[in-house]
Image (cartoon, coloured by chain):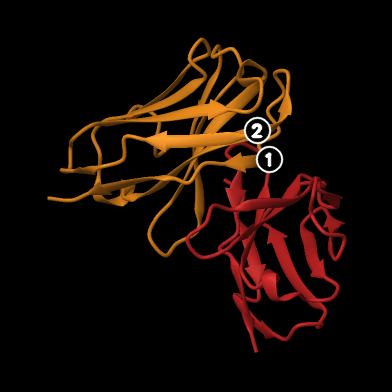
Chain colours: A orange, B red
Amino acid sequence: EVQLVESGGDLVQPGGSLRLSCSASGFTFTEYAMHWVRQAPGKGLEYVSGISSNGGNTYYTDSAKDRFTISRDNSRNTLYLQMTSLRPDDTALYYCVKDRVPYGSNSYYFDYWGQGAPVTVSS
Amino acid sequence: DIQMTQSPSSVSASVGDRVTITCRASHGIIDWLGWYQQKPGKAPKLLIHGAFNLHSGIPSRFSGSGSGTDFTLTISSLQAEDFAIYYCQQTSTFPPTFGQGTRLENK
């Protein structure tokens, strides 16, 4: 059974930093690109960032670029999102999601989602 | 970024009804279109990819169609467990973007 378990969500002040982690199991982690998608309270879904299966390529939306860093440790089956210079509009539930297609071709269809890590940016 | 617009924003229906939700892309996306279902307090679930391909384990009452800029999700006979919010998503151009969601409510 595929499981994605996020951790690290917290309340942080504007300008602060936070690192989210996602522990993956139930599939061959090294074969799949992984992504972060967020959902602000009561709002829709917004793609944040992605990383290729071997970690060699990373992808960011304009809002995440220069502030967030995605990484992965394939030896630990873990995905990370380092967030800096956090703003109130970064407040959201951050989902770790698995790409549907293996072997280096990012489909950007997300077939498994974690339960989400809540991030609140407020003073 | 490609904008995805869903209609209606909400729809009321009864068990057994046929329900159709539409999604329009601001630019042509061929058939790079997915549909997700989200229930309250839960993560979204992939229903359809590639405009019409049913994801593994999804009941056949769900179907998708369309190409270019206009797409539809159809539930042929609504079941009680289908009341949820539905999102379309384009994967044609980075970044992938989602529609604003359609809330399917019990009439």
- Residue for point 70% across, 76% down: B80
Apparent side of residue B65 relative to residue A96 in the rendered image (left or right): right
Farthest residue toward the front? A1
User: Residue B10: image x %, image y %?
Assistant: 60, 78
Residue behind mark 1 = A109
Q: Quadrant of the C terminus of chain B?
A: bottom right
Residue at left 82%, top 59%? B59
Seen at 52% across and 19% down, the residue is: A77
* 3D distance between C-alphas at marks 1 and 2: 6 Å
Image x and y of residue B101, in percent: 58, 65
Q: Quadrant of residue B16?
A: bottom right
Amino acid type assigned to the residue bearing label 2 in the image? Asp
Q: Nearer the viewer, residue A17 or A113?
A: A113
Q: Residues within 10 Å of mark 2 (few under 14, many from 20)?
A: many
Q: Which mark is residue B50?
A: none
In the foreground, B70 or A85: A85
Q: What chain is tagged by disc 2?
A: A
- State which quarter of the image contains the N terminus of chain B: top right
Q: Chain of mark 1?
A: A
Q: Residue flagged by tag 1: what amino acid is it? A: Tyr
Q: Quadrant of residue A68?
A: top left
Left or right: B18 as drawn, with respect to A9: right
Q: Residue at x 65, y 67 (%)?
A: B6
The percent position of residue A45, horizontal first and vertical second, equals 51, 53
Depth order, front residue of B68/B74? B74
Residue under pointer 2: A99
Task: Please rate how many residues cluster around mark 1, counting C-alpha atoms within 10 Å: few if below 14, some from 14 to 19, many from 20.
Answer: many
Labels 1 and 2: the sequence-earlier one = 2
